Amino acid sequence: MRLVHRRYLARFVPAMAGYCALIGLYGWLVPRTGSVGLRTLLALLPMLPVMMAMRAVALVIREQDELERQLDLQALAAAAVLTSCGFLSFGLLLSAGVLQGVPAALVALLVLPCFFWIFGLAKLVLVVRLRRR
């Protein structure tokens, strides 16, 4: 593994671990907290590691060579299009009453994880296609 990718993992993995811990804390404490101010803090606290993860992505793209940067930007574009179209379709189905019983908060919370998963899959597809050439 190249140094640029080791540095990325050293930044990204702790950020995601922090996110998971804070989301767990959020889910456990919010129902037990009456204070609106404290619930607001608990709700926004997971954004700190999310911003750290976004910074890790931006830094690795900046530090990579031109080919890797192009692959990442293509994967980011694919993830943006697929995630936004998927969630727009989901929202339209919800508003039309075709899908029921899905909490809007859950849908909103799934946008970023879906984006990251789709980015990873898109990058995998692009790398496999490149290696076949």
Image (cartoon, rainbow, N blue to C red):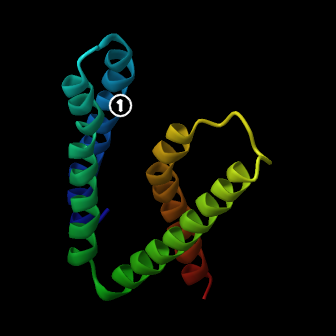
**Residue nearer the viewer, 103 or 28:** 103
**Residue annotated with mark 1:** 23
Q: Is residue 44 above or below residue 4?
A: above
Outermost residue to the right: 98
The percent coordinates of residue 51 (x first, y second) are 23, 53
Asked if 36 appears above or below 128 in the picture, the reply is above
Q: Quadrant of the C terminus?
A: bottom right
**Which residue is found at the position 27% from the left and 26% from the top?**
39
Q: What amino acid type is highlighted by mark number 1?
A: Ile
Q: Is residue 109 above or below residue 24?
A: below
Q: Position of residue 95 (x, y in %)?
A: 68, 52
Q: Residues within 10 Å of mark 1 (few under 14, many from 20)?
A: some
Secondary element at tag 1 = helix
Residue at the image point whose x is 37% and y is 79% from the top: 68
In the figure, residue 124 lies in which quadrant?
bottom right
Q: Looking at the figure, which quarter contains the N terminus?
A: bottom left
Position of 24 with respect to 120 (left or right) is left
